[in-house]
Image: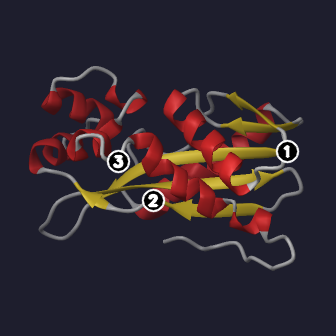
Amino acid sequence: MITVVVASQNPVKLSAAQAAFAQMLPAKPFTFQGVSVPSGVSDQPMTNAETWQGALNRAQSAFALRPTAVYTVGIEGGCEPNADGPLSVFAWVVVRHADGRTGHGKTATFFLPEEVGSLVRGGLELGDADDVVFSKSNSKQKNGSIGLLTGDVITRETYYIPAVVMALIPFVNANLSFQEPHIT
């Protein structure tokens, strides 16, 4: 069995990683574990670069915690202010292989309603702000902001799957050379 360690114990992130690996590497036998590791960035990252750094840190920290893993997956959600406009929301995914190769993927971006955005700007994490505005409990481990805003047409899990798939591109195209990105 090939061990994949997801740098989270959030069931949504675990399920998204499992689904993406099954789609991209269907002939491989995987076992998945979730571990809790720090992101090394703010609890609510507020820039593209900070969000990517959090995903990278999580993937690297998962290897430090589980050095026998073949792959680790870091998923970090973040926001970014737009000049005189709403907060945008997205997540970065970094997949790291035991040989040091990495793959990177990013979700689609959407914009928060001001009721949620103002709470995030005020210091709440997005999931907590969603719970306040939508009268929910622990929505970040369920359908998330995207699910709440789309009526579950897109859930947090289905939102993450394509980004994990994109982060797996270097591993299914091992004959090609992929450079490490510099995210700003």
What residue is at 17 percent from the left and 60 percent from the top? Answer: 86
Mark 2 and mark 3 lie on one chain; the one further toward the N terminus is 2
The percent position of residue 176, horizontal first and vertical second, equals 81, 79
Amino acid carrying mark 3 in the image: Ile
Q: How far apart are labels 2 and 3 at the CA level? A: 12 Å
Residue beneath disc 3: 154
| Nearer to the camera, 134 or 60 | 134
In the depicted structure, whether residue 87 falls above or below residue 127: below
Quarter occupied by residue 145 = top left
Residue appearing at x 53%, y 50% in the figure: 161
Label 1 to label 2, Cα distance in Å? 24 Å
**Helix, strand or loop at disc 2?**
loop
- Residue marked by disc 2: 107
Residue 20 badge? none
Number of residue marks: 3
Q: Answer with left or right where residue 113 lies relative to residue 33.
A: left
Give how far apart the Cα atoms at labels 1 and 3 are: 30 Å
Q: 93 above or below 82? A: above
Residue 123, percent from left and from top: 25, 39
Q: Is residue 42 left or right of residue 170?
A: left
Of callouts 1 and 2, the N-terminal one: 1
Look at the image and tell me in which quarter the N terminus lies: top right
Do the numbered discs 1 and 3 sit on residues whose CB atoms are within 8 Å?
Answer: no
